[in-house]
Image (cartoon, rainbow, N blue to C red):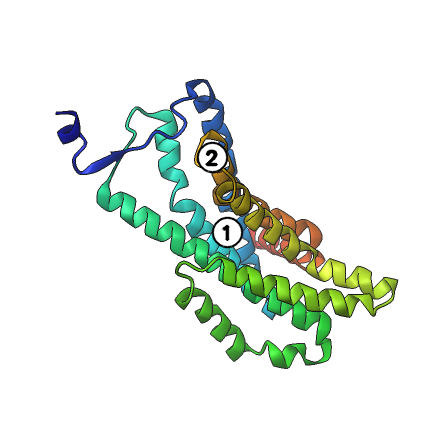
Amino acid sequence: MANRSCQGHFILLGFSDRPDLERPLFVFVLISYLAALVGNLLIVLVSRLDSRLHTPMYFFLTNLSLLDLGFTSSAIPQLLVHLRGRARAISWAGCAAQLFLFLALGGAECVLLAAMAYDRFCAVCRPLRYAVLLRPARRGGLGATVFVLSVAIVLAPLSLILASYVLIARAVLRLGSAGRAKALHTCGAHLAVVALFYGNIVCTYMQPGGAGAQGRFLTLGYSLVTPALNPVIYTLRNKDVKGALRRLVASTRGDQALS
């Protein structure tokens, strides 16, 4: 009878072994999820509305924000339901769909981070040819690479990221202090995002017992915390984005005053 009662669905244990944590976790996850939604939607909006941000870097940043929106939304809403309700089951079809979306979008983000590493390589090591190397047709092609070749790809993009930064490091070592500071500013935000995303994955899946309670907490790192922090990393470090935000706010206030 027990087996038959579970036919057609899985029982998700989640954090049920720590019921005292479920309420604070619900608050933390909800706030982080809302921050991820608002931050990434704002990045997409600003990048599309401000013509000064129609450059290769912001093309990739917009795609990163769109991927983060889908990636975190593929699992977090159901986690919120489970943390607050008694229903802890998911149908087989729902589980398969959620797993497919989570892995596909996560794999796509790995490939996109590799494409962004190539963008940073061109900006630092080939500045005079940057506009030619990252012309719109090539940017579109790289974006399509992201979505076609994203299934089950994690280590290949990481290898490309590392190779790009080895070449960047070799170029930076030949620069003076001013050039090194500029290169660090150019690559710093992307490096921080890569470290957050891959760091959580490595800690979760490349240690013994990663599937336990510690593994579940670490999973929240790359599925929720990283998408929430990505917009903050790029906006706080980037004067172009902050300037675009100020212009957008000023334009909105001007329209309201006229109306």
Residue drawn at 33 percent across, 52 percent down? 100
Is residue 224 depicted above or below 167 in this figure? above
Secondary element under disc 1, as helix, strand or loop, is helix
Give the residue pinned by disc 1. 41
Left or right relative to 145: residue 82: left
Can residue 229 be seen at all in this image of the molecule? yes
**What is the x, y in percent for residue 138?**
53, 77
221 or 231, nearer to the observer: 221
Tag 1: amino acid: Leu
> Spatial distance from mark 1 to mark 2, Cα to Cα?
36 Å
Marks 1 & 2, CB-CB < 8 Å contact: no
Residue drawn at 39 percent across, 27 percent down? 83
**What is the x, y in percent for residue 36?**
51, 44
**What is the x, y in percent for residue 46?**
57, 58
179 or 242, nearer to the observer: 179
**Camera-nearest label, 1 or 2:** 2
Picture disc at residue 209: 2
